[in-house]
Amino acid sequence: MLFLTQNFRNLWAFIFVINVLFSPTLFSQTFTKIIDFEQINGSRSHSKLISDGTYFYGITLLGGEHDKGVIFKIKEDGSDYIKLHDFDGTNGYKPYNSLTLVGTELFGVTFQGGLNDNGVLFKLNTDGTGFTKLIDFSVDNNGKLPQSSLLFDGTYLYGTTYSGGSNTGGGSIYKIKPDGTDYTLIHSFVGGGGNYSINGSQPQNDLLIDEDYLYGVTFSGGENEDGTIYRIKTDGSDFEKLHDFIDTFDHQNVSSSGLLLHEGFLYSNTFLGIENENGFIYRIKTDGSQYEILHDFDVTMGAKPAGELVFHEEFLYGTTGAGGTYSGGIIFKIKPDGTEFSKVFDFTTEPGYGPRAGLIKFGNSLYGLTTSGGNYGHGTIYKYDDETLSIDSSVKDNKVKIYPNPVQNQLFIELSSNYFPAEFIIYDQLGRKVMIGQIETIRQSVNLSSLKAGIYFIEIEKETYKIIKK
């Protein structure tokens, strides 16, 4: 099974020689290339960016001093690119995942490298100091070959391993505290296929959390050996399989992306499956009911989506790694009910092509990375704006006041009289909607006591502001 998932990744396995540029290139009114990578500064990123409000942080699969990947940060305008860390094998190799920010520390995993060459879990400071291996994954019962990003709930980091665990190598779900203590295996998937793996096997994408459950997908296992959607409590109890994937062309492993939660539904893409064998977009209720395919990709309008979806301005946005006019992938949008699908950008050589990671919402823009293309042939960071939904940002500073910031529990929002009533939406660092409400008066308070400490983004009248919850 590992051979299959690596084959999917190898569709984009190009040899890269990349150079960093700090003058963004404008390709249209909506798409801006921020940088072209350089091999020494990173190569072939499969990760999604994260933000602390000042810098984006990312990770590359290859490149750097040892061609085993790097961690970097960069400002949203493409300036101040800083390489924070070079992987060298002993401290990790081939990081497919995205980073997770907790305070001023970045956490992540690598797929290989470390003491046993089965991957590591690491942390480092946002200034690049203090790199520490917290876990060397092994063939024993802590799992091995992790590919998913870490999820922080305010106390524990949660993640999955593609293989290993205590049940014949089907992979695992684990949790660990940010200081490296209290590592706990909360679930082991059963390998071996057939009835052994009926609940799913080989998880490889990011976990999602709501008030009650962790949600995830598996690469294989289930009734049809095409993977499953599942949920489980954070203490490891109440594991439940929500859905069995099936591919009408009898390909195993439709390879679902990580999940997005929006208004009671889980949304995602698959890499394969349905009529055209090019993947599809689906949604399903968090209890496993109302499974529905929203869109079937057909090459000309994109193929092989691999990154998570993000909700922005009443649409779900995502990317495909192939297909489109130039066969380099696309950016697309679709309404949550499956209507109004449209291709909004075609990737080609100059802006970069073959995106493998999801988009991140920051301000009024979406940002992402490509694995290939650009001025030097090997990947870019880009920004996408949908100008049909934007407003004049020159009024931003005058119409909204938000204080105190940082905030303990009670946030105050003041709007000029011309702009209320209005809606506010609060997102976490991964672009997940965590709170929504109405502003009915010129000065209104919002209780944030239910939010965990961290960095959030509040959107009001299509403008976005960073807030820090203490």
Image (cartoon, rainbow, N blue to C red):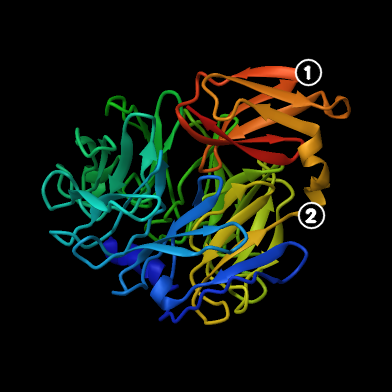
Is the residue marked by circle 1 packed among few (<14), some (14-19), or many (20+) residues within 10 Å?
few
Q: Amino acid at mark 2?
A: Glu
Q: Which residue is mark 2?
A: 387
Q: Amino acid at mark 1?
A: Glu
Horizontal side of residue 108 vs 313, given as left or right? left
Of 396 and 39, the residue lying toward us? 396
Q: Residue at x 63, y 51 (%)?
A: 317
Q: Which residue is mark 1?
A: 440
Horizontal side of residue 232 vs 271, given as left or right? left
Residue 151 occupies quadrant: top left
Look at the image and tell me whether residue 21 can be seen: yes
Residue 455 percent across, percent down from the top left: 51, 36
Residue 86 percent across, percent down from the top left: 32, 66
Residue 91 percent across, percent down from the top left: 22, 60
- 281 in relation to 72, above or below: above
Residue 420 percent across, percent down from the top left: 82, 25
Of 42 and 15, the residue lying toward us? 42
Whether tag 1 and tag 2 are in contact, CB under 8 A, the answer is no
Give the number of the mark in front: 1 or 2: 1
